[in-house]
Amino acid sequence: MTRTLTLVCLLAALASRAGAADSLRVSVTVDPRIELLTAVQCLAGAEDLGHFDLAYRREILQRFGPWRAHRVVALLAAMRRAGFTREAPAAVVLRLADPPGLELRAPLTASLEARAGGREQLFAFLYGLRDFAAETGFMAFYEEHAALYRRLCAQTERSLRRTRVVSPLEEYFGARLNGYHLMLAPLLPSGGYGAEVVRPPGRVDGYAILGPSGVRADRPRFWGPDDLEALLWHEFGHTFVGNLPDSCRGAIAADSALFPPLRARMEAQGYSRWETCADEHLVRAVGVRLVARLQGSRAGERTLDRQLRLGFAYLPGLLIGLERYERERDLFPTLGDFCPELAAALDRRAARQLPRP
């Protein structure tokens, strides 16, 4: 009995050390660029912010309320109506230096320009954001809240030390990113967004921008270890999936006839194109498998059930494919290598199993 208990304690200690080492590869910040963006979104009445009653939100509205008529606030509201929503605004500001200068530090993509309504409008937004930061003295507000930001980061770093995030993702995809960045954003809704920044020559950084899980004593409260682990697998997973070979993602998204049966539920969640929906299915399928492998089969079943209730109806076929991938890693060292096989899990037979739209 004593020997068994000693072995259990040793294994737990080794797992804890492995988690702590893994967590050191993830930077944790409350980023001034994201806070500037969400302050402007707050003034613009953006629907994709959270609805927690926070002292921090009230302070932002009080401090920056006199600038509600600033041109960047009106411009952002118009761009949102045209589709500049979800992760797109954050992905743009992450390519900039810190406020108030906000100099462009990494290339903008054609996709981001399109979602912003064109290159000219996107740069009008950047110039307006720079002017807003300077005119309002935004960085003084940010520095005044440094103690709050430090507390939020310290709490999340403690949770992060009890997770396994980077190594499982790199092992599963057979690939790695240049950097992993967790950004806490008090004004975002529960959950968050994934984003990436590519810098020549081909260095890809993944970003997970998370909103709080709740409120405690009028302050945002972020995620505990199990929830944080699964959230980061999902958000960083977007960057891994987004950097699979184009031929791989194209094969998985080839059958656009699969989209109509899901269209209504997917569009309600912001996935208006089949290619985006296919990527989202793959990210969520990998997430289900990581939860099942590392948090247990029951946790995996609960995660799958939750995703099916959200309408991701093609997950069972993808999961069968991924289980084969896990068994045959000697033949398929990376998920990119396995894509032709995985694409076969998404065919017209799946669509015929669903009711017509």
Image: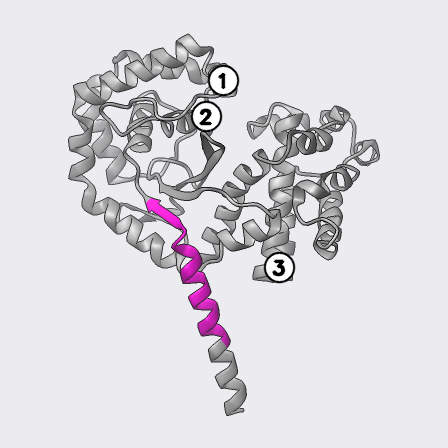
Q: In which quarter of the image is the N terminus?
A: bottom right
Region of the chain picked out in magenta, as a range = 11-28
Q: Name the residue under label 2.
A: 88
Residue 338, x across and y down, in percent? 72, 43
Q: What percent of the width, then of the height, locates residue 223?
A: 41, 51
Q: Is residue 5 above or below residue 355?
A: below
Going from N to C along the chain, the mark reached first, 1 or 2, is 2
As drawn, 154 above or below 78: below
Q: Residues within 10 Å of mark 1 (few under 14, many from 20)?
A: some
Kindly indicate the quadrant of the structure image that contains residue 136.
top left
Residue type at mark 3 is Arg
Q: Are marks 1 and 2 in contact (CB under 8 Å)?
A: yes
Q: Which of marks 3 and 2 is nearer the N terminus?
A: 2
Residue at image point 78% right, 34% down: 354
Q: What residue type is labelled 1?
A: Arg
Q: Do the residues labelled 1 and 3 touch (CB within 8 Å)?
A: no
Work out which quarter of the rendered image holds the C terminus and state it.
Answer: top right
| Within-10-Å neighbours for mark 2: few <14, some 14–19, many 20+ | some
Asked if residue 338 lies left or right of residue 175, the reply is right
Q: Mark 3 points at which residue?
A: 293
Left or right: where 90 falls relative to 251:
left
Q: What element carries label 3?
A: helix
Q: Do the residues labelled 3 and 2 touch (CB within 8 Å)?
A: no
